[in-house]
Amino acid sequence: MGRTVITSTQLLQKIQDDDWSKFRRALRQEDQKVLDELFALARFHTAPMAYASTPAPMEAVLIAMLIEMMKRIRRLELNEPER
């Protein structure tokens, strides 16, 4: 018997590949790399995304991206090395 619900990691990949692929192609190459990096940052939070199980999963993806960006900003403000 197979899974009836895809994992949050699979969902994140599906969102990136299906929902945002046209947007990504329209970006300049340097911006495409930044978008890819943002999605990579969101992967750090797939467990909380699965736990939240929201009807709008893109909201959880965006929050995960914001959390990682805020952590980077704070490290820069405090001149701390990246972990």
Image: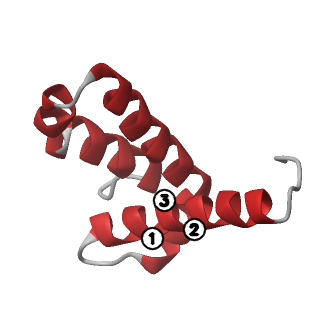
Q: Do the residues labelled 2 and 3 touch (CB within 8 Å)?
A: yes
Looking at this rendering, what residue extends furthest in the top direction?
Answer: 29
Judged from the image, the secondary structure of the residue bearing numbered disc 1 is: helix
Q: Where residue 43 sits: x, y (%)?
A: 53, 49
Whether pointer 1 and pointer 2 mark residues with C-beta atoms closer than 8 Å, the reply is yes
Is residue 37 at all visible to an observer of this figure? yes
**Distance from label 3 to label 1 (Cα)?**
5 Å
Residue at left 29%, top 64%? 58
Residue corresponding to mark 2: 67
Contact between marks 3 and 1 (CB within 8 A): the answer is yes
Name the residue: 43% across, 45% down.
Answer: 39
Front position in the image: 54 or 32: 32
Q: How busy is the neighbourhood of tag 1: few (under 14 within 10 Å), some, or many (20 plus)?
A: some
Q: What residue type is labelled 3?
A: Met
In terms of image quadrants, where is residue 80?
A: bottom right
Report helix, strand or loop for mark 2. Answer: helix
Q: Which amino acid does label 1 sit on?
A: Ile
Q: List the residue tagged with mark 3.
A: 65
Residue in the image at 50% along x and 66% along y: 66
Q: Can residue 2 be seen in this view?
A: no
User: Would residue 6 appear left or right of 66 to someone viewing this image?
Assistant: left
Image spot of residue 81 (x, y percent) = 88, 48
Estimate the x, y position of residue 59 in percent, counting from the top left: 32, 71
Question: Mark 1 sits on what residue?
Answer: 63
Q: Which residue is drawn at 26% across and 48% down?
A: 15
- In three-dimensional space, the C-alpha distance between marks 1 and 2, rounded to whole angstroms, equals 6 Å
